[in-house]
Every structure is written in structure tokens, then in C-alpha cells.
Amino acid sequence: MGLADGALRDRNWVVAVSAVGRAVGAGGGKTGGSAGGERAKAVTLLTLDFFFVAGGCVLAAVGGLIAADAAHPKRWGSAAFWLLLALAIGAGKWLSPTVVGYLVLGLTGLIATNRVGAAHGGVVDPVVLKERAARLGNRLIWPLFLVPTVAVVGGLTLEWVKVGDFLLVQPKQVAQVALGIGCFAGITLAMRTTGEGPRVAAQEGGRLLQLLGWAVLLPQMLAALGGVMGKAGVGDEIAHLVAAVLPVQIPVVAVLAYCGGMALFTILLGNAFAAFPVMTLGVGLPFIVKAHGGDPAVMGTLGMLSGYCGTLVTPMAANFNLVPARLLELRDDFAVIKAQVPFAAAIWVFNVVVMYVCVFRR
């Protein structure tokens, strides 16, 4: 999932969805960084492309296993979905934006026609699972801790690792590459601990992916939507509307408008990354930074946190709020959202107060 979510930073996704919508392609997609001067321009041995290809291979394996499962209730539609997604993620860099756009349309069509579903049951017998869990005990959680440990340590050290005259990782890609290495380390330790092989890992991982279903597309699609809306000038229209309705010449009103807009747009779009360019261009920059001399770093940081408050209370963020309820087999699909509402409200109020106190101190 981390690799799938990481695809939202791949330029092809944003450009492709923009092309499908006859809009201007958005997104930077530059993987090189300026950090470290000439170090960022040096040839590197390990890039994000490797992990995108690896993620595509995993998704292709899931699609192949589904196609081979005659008992799958939605066999061919589900297989096509995961194979198309594998192609978009694994080979997106080498495909034209138009081709990736058609792949996105194909994925959307399969979802809209209800051709994608999950298989029944797991690969390993539940009784065997309980016996193994009792035997292995706390060793089962070691792979879970290994992933973030490797990601943190790698994020702090990989930037400085060199092999001869070559950098191991580009400075701007260190965090993502470290996470990818952590995932490989975690799955390796998990297979060694349980004694299972790659096939079972692909089958069980595929089963969880099938339970998530179409929700795995939301981060990429919503990020693309935010880019398209930004290019379409939605932020400018919001700026005119806010200026006409609210007294934004008062600093606290500008802060409330920005934080409230971030939360509201995130609720509507399901993703703070999609809301951020729209609200920052439409409200944050003109009314907080330019009009009142606010600090853009403080504004952006607390603005994103305000958007995350909207994430906590919207069913549009299905991968956060609906999928866990299904995985835990809760009776109420909205149980997670109901539990998070008071915390979201409290954090949003805190963000508004902190932004008002700190953003104008320069």
C-alpha cells in the first residue's frame, strides 16, 4: 500500500488524469533535489523507479492469482482491475500520459460497473493461523516494527552513503527509498518468521488489497483532482467569493476562512492534499500572507493539519475511515468517523488558535 500511495507523486498520474479531463497537465514529478548542491546531480544507484516497478509486480501477481481462481465471485473484472493498476504504477514512467489516462478510465469503468470484488476466505486455515499465532507469540509483530525502524534510520543516513563516485540515493528521495527498503526488510523477516514463501505473501497481501478494493485509488485520484482544480483557476474564484462574503481584512477572519476552508474542502474531496493547493492559492496566500504579512511556512503547516481534521470526519476518505471498519468487521460503517468527530473538532480549534498566535509573528 505504501508503494501504491507513493504513486501520487508520480507525474504521470496527475498529467494523465488532466489529459482525460481535457485540462492542462499538472505536477512537478522532478525527482532530483537541490539539497547538497552537486550531490543531487550525481548518478544514483537506487531510485524510486525500482520501487514503483516492484509495486507493479506485486499488483500483477495479485491480478494473476485472481485470474487463476475459478471460485472468485468477480474473477475477470477484479483481475483486470489489478493488472491495469499494476501497469499504471509499474510502467507509468515509460508510458505516455494519454495511455495512463486511458488506464485510469478503464479502472474507473470497472469500479463503476461493480466488476471488482474480494475473494471469500483466506489462504491459510483459521485453525492453523491460531495455532501459529500462539506458537510465534510476539515475534509476529517484529516485522511491523522493522518497517518504520528501517525507514527512520535510512532517512537519516542513506543520503550520505556513497559507492565509489556514485550516491546510493538522491537526497530528495531518501525518505521514500528508506520506506521502500523497510517494506522489503519487513516482508523478508515476516516470511522467515512464519516459514511461508512469496506465494503465500502475495496471496494474503492480495486478499487484504481486495478488501480495500477501489479505495486504493483514492489518494492518487484525489491528488490529481487537486492539481487539475489548481490549474483550472478554482483558487482564484474562491478568492473572489471569500473576499465578497467575509471581512478578510480582519486577521482572525482570514485565519478562520483558511482553516475552515481546508477542513470543508477536505471533507468534500476526501484528501487534504487535494484541498491544499486550492485553498492556499484562493485564501491562504492572498489574505494571510500578502494582505497581513503572515508566515507562509506556519500557514501551510497548520493549514494541512486543519485539512486532516476534515479527513477524520468524511466518508470520502474511505481508505482511512471506511476500510478499517470493514477490516475489523464492525457493524456500523461509520463507527470510526463517529469516534473521531470530537477529536477532529478539538484539534481544529487548536490549529486556529495556534495559527492566529504564530502566523503573524515575523
Image (cartoon, helix red, strand yellow):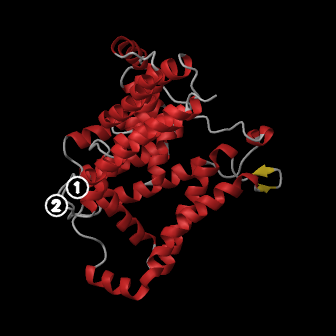
Judge by depth and name the residue closer to the eye, 280 or 19: 280
Residue, disc 1? 335
Instruction: Work out whether residue 265 can be spotted.
Output: yes
As drawn, is 327 to the left or to the right of 300? left
Q: Residues within 10 Å of mark 1 (few under 14, many from 20)?
A: some
| Image position, residue 155 (x, y; %) | 64, 55
Above or below for 355 versus 241: below
Numbered-mark total: 2
**Is residue 270 positioned above or below 340 on the image?**
above
* Residue 21: x %, y % from top left: 36, 24
Rendered-image quadrant of the N terminus: bottom left
Residue 56 as seen in the image, left or right of residue 174:
left
Q: Name the residue: 22% across, 55% down.
A: 335
Residue occupied by mark 2 = 331
Which residue does the image show at 31% across and 77% down from the upper left? 124
Q: Is residue 227 above or below residue 10?
A: above
Q: Where's the C terminus, which quadrant? A: top right
Q: Nearer the viewer, residue 110 or 5?
A: 5
Question: Marks 2 and 1: which is nearer the front?
Answer: 1
Q: Is residue 203 left or right of residue 74?
A: right
Amino acid type for the residue under numbered disc 2: Arg
Percent x, y for residue 217? 36, 44
Separation of residues labelled 2 and 1 (CA atoms): 8 Å
Which residue: 49% across, 80% down?
Answer: 193
